[in-house]
Image (cartoon, coloured by chain):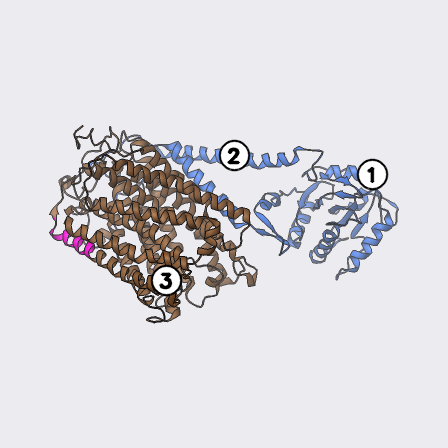
Chain colours: A brown, B blue
Amino acid sequence: MTEETGKSFYETGRPGIRGWIFSTDHKRIGLLYLTSMLTFFTVGVCLGLTMRLQLMFPGHSIVPAHVYNSLYTLHGVIMIFLFVIPGLPAVFGNFMLPLMLGAEDVAFPRINLLSWWLFVTGAGLALLTIFFGGLPDTGWTFYAPYSIRSGQNVSLAVFAAFILGFSSILTGLNFVVTIHRLRAKGMGWFKMPLFAWGLYATGWIQILATPVVGITLLLILVERIFHIGLFDPTIGGDPVLYQHLFWIYSHPAVYIMILPAMGAISEIVPTFSRRTIFGYKMIAFSSMAIAIVGYLVWGHHMFTSGMSNTARAVFSLLTFLVAIPTAVKVFNWLATLYKGSIVLQTPLLFALSFIFLFSIGGFTGLIQGALSTDIHLHDTTFIVAHFHYTMFGGTGFAFFGALHYWFPKMFGRMYKEKPAKLGWLLMFLGFNFLYFPLFIAGFMGQPRRYYDYLPKFAVPNLVSTIGSWILVAGLIVLAVNLIRALRFGEKAPANPWKAATLEWETSSPPPLENFVEPPVVTQGPYDFVGKGLVKG
Amino acid sequence: MFSGRKILRRSLGVLAAFFSILVGFRSGSVAAADGGKEAFVGIEERLGEKIPMDLILRDEKGEPISLSSLFAGKPVLLELVYYECPGICTPFLQSTAELLEEVPAVPGKDFTAVAVSISPSETAAVAARKKREIFGGMRRAVSRDGWRFLTGETEPVRRLAEAVGFRYRENGSGFLHTTALIVLSPGGKITRYIYGKNFLAADLQLALVEASEGRVGPTVARVLRYCFNYDPTGDRYVLDVKKVAGAAVSLGGLFLLGTLLLTGRREEKRPRRRQTSGADGEIDGNEEGREK
């Protein structure tokens, strides 16, 4: 066992597939998540492409209406429950958090493995609906009473989402305990990297909000199976109650999606400007502030569902409040770049486009947070454009930025810079072509979730469909470049980007127990001068 | 290094702190409600206390009747109302009537139901008329001695109401008051309060069995009621899932945070697994799958 020193985690441990799917090593679990999630992401992209193709011209039909209903449901369920929500925490959180804290592993490695298994089980159950009883057609929100009455196999899909919820709770719990208990010697709360702060805030949301949706989904099952009137008004239920319960989880869930992404951006920006982050504490606190205020804004999804005017005004005000900590982060990132020695490499390109796209997503969010405009924009493609700008332009771009940032550490290889930049450019352009026209169409009144539309929306829809092809071309370039790098890429040094956080102090890829000697922290996480990475 | 016992002790400490906060919160809010004695209308529970059995009231014919004669070795179901009440008394008496029809115990044989008017101006004739009205609407005959409609002078009624903690106030020609079924043991001890609008026969049956044995039942209804919301369209109380789920989740979260803050950071690195494997896998037990 002593000869383990000097070997990476790939070379130690059980050989074969069993060494992966039964491994409790956080790095292996992170890679398990990465491969499974990228698989689901590919499926989700294909579904999205089919939808866009259907909507390319008005009236032309590739899929019938009920299939379109299943398409957007599946696209939503897969992208949200299987990609964006587990997203950065499950992959980069698992792989990087213990490294960043100077720990050997997460606090509960077996629970960590269990949560991956739950994730795969939930995903498998969702896929089973293809063969048993038909794909769900309710939209990813499973709104009652339709989800109660739909003849499709909603029960199985709902149960799958329930299982996935547990996976999320366990991951969150694991990270919170890890951050409390396993920081390296000398690493106080304010010497933690900001990605860890993002995960910490996320962890609490996962622990506190996810049980609510678990209960709610269970109630749907109870109602479908035993016909107890909970949400269906014809048997004495309350459909608005369902919406409340659903959004009590699902609005905080969008902060589960975005907070780790913001954390990753807070790592990338200082590294590529060779400067300590501006306003460390404010960024850390703003993560917590978003997590807390994020609990209190769910009602803004229901402005048109029947609520008192007082409730609507309060929810609207609270929604505006979320913009404050978010803006704090954006301004701090920009201030970090100011007078920095900027190195414009792929991860930074993704980070900059994140800031740009997420700002558009955030500002259009305020338009919907305002009562008077939301009444008109509700259920139009404006909303679709808004949440794609935040979830894909935000979390999605951060995900790919993080992937390019940590790729050398995870796989020990360097990818080629030029194709990566080309891929990014195609993705960025394609993204804007794809989603920006939907703002316009939505503003003109095109409703979302329809398989057809009036001829007056033809132009923006055509542009949008062409944009989807550019975007996918970009994704393909990125994927080919990274896969090629796995085999043929140059060997990565321990710290290719000259970053200052702990994970770059061990070899790439790291050894089984992360550090040869347990690290002792004396400097801040972004002290480039103190660590000799930049001349003072 | 942490010993398992230390962690356990600390966790228990947190748990205890938690429940004391919880209990404090509950009693605090009850105390607040009872605070303004003058203004308070409602029920101040006197579980386990005895009512004065020597009080003299009036029966339906206007004859004096002593409270103790109503018991005769059986439990009593007491309700304080007034018969010309324009508000909740009549519905309350009607749901009592339904309850008496459904409950397996037989009124008059196994227990006695007693309605007492809190209005000193109401006469026996008024009580008798109300009794005919209510009995007329019942599908199952209840013996006339099984459910008494009594009236009384100011003084004894006041003392009775005071003894069971029933607080009411005169307001114009009527009264501000609330309703509850009060179950008394054969010896006159208050054993249970049952609140609500519609009653379950099983609740009463259980309370009567307890009362006949002289056992005092805890009132869970009051705590539970916090978790229910009045639904005006359905005219009933419904479970407020949001409150229950919210409370459960936040308490769980606070408990976790408390534990984490108390236990703090792992104080010293345990020996790396590579040298001593599995010597102290108490915080996590991840020996397996690691070195195989």
Q: Crowding near pointer 1: few (<14 within 10 Å), some, many (20+)?
A: few
Q: Disc 2 designates what residue?
A: B21
User: What x and y, as percent, mark residue A217?
Assistant: 44, 56
Residues shaded magenta: A477-489
User: What x and y, as percent, mark residue B193?
Assistant: 67, 44
Q: Disc 1 designates what residue?
A: B154
Q: Does residue A15 appear in this view?
A: no
In whole angstroms, how far apart are the C-alphas of marks 2 and 3? 47 Å
Q: Crowding near pointer 2: few (<14 within 10 Å), some, many (20+)?
A: few
Query: In this rendering, which labeled residue sits more in front, label 2 or label 3?
Result: 3
Q: Amino acid at mark 1?
A: Thr
Hey, which quadrant is residue A235 in on the image?
bottom right
Q: Residue at x 29, y 38 (%)?
A: A333
Chain for disc number 2: B
In front here: A363 or A451? A363
Q: Residue B3 vs residue B94: left or right?
A: left
In whole angstroms, how far apart are the C-alphas of marks 1 and 3? 73 Å
Chain for disc number 3: A
Check disc 1 and report its element: helix, strand or loop: helix
Check disc 3 and report its element: helix, strand or loop: helix
Please give the label number shown on residue A72. Answer: 3
Hey, which quadrant is residue B44 in on the image?
top right
A479 in the magenta segment: yes
Q: Residue A53 vs residue A364: left or right?
A: left
User: What x and y, as percent, mark residue A141?
Assistant: 42, 57
In front here: A1 or B254? B254
In front here: B202 or A436? A436
B238 in the magenta segment: no
Q: Amino acid at mark 3?
A: Tyr
In whole angstroms, how far apart are the C-alphas of marks 1 and 2? 42 Å
Q: Amino acid at mark 2?
A: Ile
Q: Mark 1 or 2 closer to N-term? A: 2
